[in-house]
């Protein structure tokens, strides 16, 4: 495969083994991919299958990142609120690929496919509340176990602590 193959080529190849894989086509300007990575979108139930295909068939053996974007105001016809993104790299072909899925809050773990995704999935669970089915130890990573809520959800109300600058003014005579 050439280094400058269009994203649809990767999606078309994946579709032969991963049902409903498609080239990612942004529906809004906010969704545009500006880094040039080939991007394939799959349903949440096929997320791990897509990751496995990228590793085993397409040669994207290096796990780079797994992250989440929350958009609670996303129009219903565009899919669920959480967009999960897996970024991988092919050392032999020197190119990147991104696998996307949209989920309401539950997706299959890719940790069995890419061991490096272990703590990335825990972080997404901790901060966004997305549950990864099949994860070996899905527990909080950054926040204490007793913490209520998920602070990076855009509808989460974080506790506020007032800042009193009058003490500083009096102390330093400002």
Image (cartoon, rainbow, N blue to C red):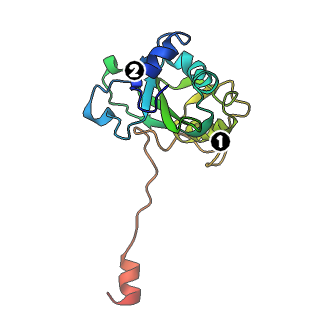
User: What is the C-alpha distance between the residues marked 1 and 2?
Assistant: 30 Å
Against 25, residue 35 (above or below) is below
Residue 24 visible in the picture: yes
- Residue matched to label 2: 8
In the rendered structure, which disc, 1 or 2, sits on the residue that comes first in sequence? 2
For the residue pair 30 and 71, the one nearer the viewer reads as 30
Against 77, residue 168 (above or below) is below
Q: Nearer the viewer, mark 1 or mark 2?
A: 2
Q: What is the x, y in percent for residue 73?
A: 32, 30
For the residue pair 62 and 32, the one nearer the viewer reads as 62
**Which quarter of the picture shows residue 74?**
top left
For the residue pair 113 and 89, the one nearer the viewer reads as 89
At horizontal 40% and vertical 81% (from top left) the residue drawn is 168
- Quick one: quadrant of the C terminus? bottom left
**Which quarter of the picture shows residue 33?**
top left
Q: Secondary structure at mark 1?
A: helix
Residue 67 visible in the picture: no
- Residue matched to label 1: 119
Evaluate if marks 1 and 2 touch, with contact meaning CB atoms under 8 Å apart: no
At horizontal 50% and vertical 37% (from top left) the residue drawn is 95
Q: What is the x, y in percent for residue 105?
A: 51, 26
* Number of residues whose C-alpha sits closer than 10 Å to that of mark 2, classed few (under 14), some (14–19) or many (20 or more): some
Furthest residue toward front: 2
Against 162, residue 138 (above or below) is above
For the residue pair 151 and 121, the one nearer the viewer reads as 121
């Amino acid at each position: 495969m050439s280094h400058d193959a269009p994203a649809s080529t990767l999606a078309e190849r994946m579709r032969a083994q991963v049902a409903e894989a498609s080239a990612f086509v942004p529906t809004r300007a906010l969704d545009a991919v500006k880094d040039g990575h080939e991007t394939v979108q799959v349903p949440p139930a096929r997320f791990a299958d897509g990751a496995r295909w990228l590793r085993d068939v397409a040669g994207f053996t290096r796990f780079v990142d797994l992250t989440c974007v929350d958009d609670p105001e996303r129009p219903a016809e565009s899919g669920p609120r959480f967009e999960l993104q897996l970024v991988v790299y092919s050392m032999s072909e020197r190119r990147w690929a991104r696998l996307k899925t949209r989920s309401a809050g539950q997706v299959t773990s890719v940790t069995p496919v890419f061991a490096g995704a272990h703590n990335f999935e825990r972080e997404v669970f901790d901060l966004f509340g997305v549950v990864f089915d099949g994860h070996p130890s899905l527990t909080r990573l950054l926040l204490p176990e007793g913490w209520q809520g998920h602070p990076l959800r855009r509808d989460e109300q974080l506790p506020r602590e007032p800042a009193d600058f009058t003490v500083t003014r009096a102390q330093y005579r400002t």
